[in-house]
Amino acid sequence: MIVGIQLYGLLCNHDRDIKDLIPAIRDAGAKFIEPCVSLSGENSMPWCFLPKERLEELMPFIRENGLSVPSCHIRSANLLKDAPEMKRLAETWGIRCFVIGVPSFDPAELQEEAFRVRETAEILKEAGACLLLHNGKEAMEHQIAGRSAYEYFTDICLGALKMQLDTGWAEAGGACIPEFLAKNESRIASVHFKDFVKPGEDRADVPIGSGSVDSRNALQFGRANGCMLVVDQDVYNEFPEDMLRSLRYLNSLSNMRDHSVSYLNILDTETMEVRVLKRFDHVIEAPNWLRKQNALVYNSEGRIFRFDLDTLESTQIDTGEAKFCNNDHVVSYDENWIAVSAGSEKVRGSRVYKVPLTGGKAQLLTEKTPSYLHGWSPDGKTLVYCAFREIGGELHVDVYGISGDGGEETRLTREGFNDGPEFSFDGEWIYFISTRTGLMQVWRMRPDGSEETQLTFEEQNNWFGHISPDGSKVVNIVYRKDQLLPNEHLSNMHVELWMMDPDGKNHHRILGFFGGQGSINVNSWAPDSRHLAFVSYDVEL
């Protein structure tokens, strides 16, 4: 993920040479800057809009510091008249996007300006450049023909420009960000992030992630759609600390989990009430619910822990040489053993081991790597797992079975990317997920690999189908199809839990939360087939 810095707020708040700002931006980890540039006419905001001559003087210095200028906001008295100058800047300096605002709220004036936009866009196209439309608060609030002025002007320009969505001003102007993103998915090319101490204040005055604006949906959208992502803070109370905090927050949301906190939760699937058991100041993942003990098992930082539901305290389980445990682990039905997917000091790739549930020596079950365990048959004789194997010179990801004591593995699937296999509690079925029909969907098959049947069909990625102990329902985690690739299941995203009958009927949404990877990777149903454990996450700096 690449994030840049909008110069507006920095130049507004800090009386220093712009050359002092550029190295600080580079050192903070930003990859580009987005300046405001005055092309022609009277400049009413000289402190933040650079004359085009000054920008060109700075371009060699900007490049020497490893930064680029892919886009800039422009102030123009006549857009069409200035089009040749924008084309020259694009050809000379590689600027690809010129950003304008909604010029008026009068429909007749907007129709005239739309003509100039369309003509300008044709000229810029010759240089591989384009126009973007930025929104202010008023452009979202003001309605024309049943749409915001921002959407109305985009519409009448007939594809000549795309949107640069300012999430702070959009929310302040009354927009629901997730709905706006979904509605305008194909038109948004750039996303600006702002945050406010209180909703809709006049200036974005705090680092992103520390105020009232929820940036998570917009970040996921921008990452999935290849948008330019820009920190756009109007007021920097502390420089460069505010800029650093904004960048850290956005990077943490993009699956860097250094700043994640975890919440271990129980969902009542009848009342849909969620009870938070405990907050952790680090990442925990993938709870298994023990059937004979009032406890859960989870992994964290490469280790396995038992979580007592009476005391709400955790105790580490010794897993021997399996020192680097991931979030794919299963407890045997007799609860004498736990099988883990883990690396060791000698082999860091994930292999399957089994260890006494009370802790002790680890027994290696799979020699090949990577192997990610998900299921154990009720009779204890077979484990099933997802494995990456090279077959015929090509990499295949399939479901495999192996004896509970190790030995030769048996390939059970042969189409698509297959993951997450687990046995039904009667041993009659293996539920698994596969991309063989396009998106990730829940399937089931017999333990010998026969009768493969697709159970979910929605236009979304359905991951990890977990069947309840009584066999009456299946829960899975859902990612929107535009959030990621079908074979990805990432952390720090808005996700949903869906539930269905064991044959795939009555599939419906039951809960939305912030989570993803680690939330519900393995079966976490309670013995009563009513309650479900899962992990949600947040990012705190």
Image (spheres, rainbow, N blue to C red):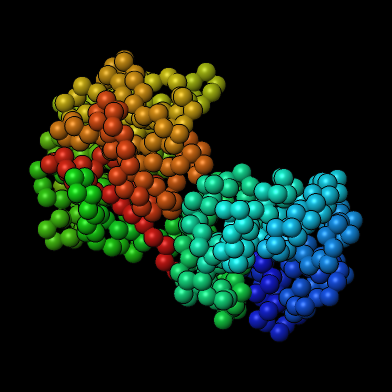
- Residue 52 drawn at (x, y percent): 85, 68
* Residue 275 placement, left or right of 135: left
Q: Residue furthest left?
A: 292
At x 39%, y 47%, the residue is 495
- Residue 415 drawn at (x, y percent): 45, 21
At x 50%, y 63%, the residue is 174
Q: Inspect this view and state whether residue 321 appears.
A: no
Residue 74 found in image quarter: bottom right
At x 63%, y 47%, the residue is 187
Residue 399 found in image quarter: top left
The one of 221 and 311 positioned closer to us in this rendering = 221
* Residue 323 placement, left or right of 397: left
Q: Residue furthest bottom?
A: 15
Q: Residue furthest top?
A: 450
The one of 199 and 333 positioned closer to us in this rendering = 199
Give the number of marks: 0
User: Looking at the image, is 510 positioned above or below residue 198?
Assistant: above
Q: Where's the C terminus, which quadrant? A: bottom left
Q: Inspect this view and state whether residue 433 appears.
A: yes
Residue 260 found in image quarter: bottom left
The one of 130 and 452 positioned closer to us in this rendering = 130
At x 28%, y 63%, the residue is 279
- Residue 273 drawn at (x, y percent): 22, 53
- Residue 398 drawn at (x, y percent): 41, 26
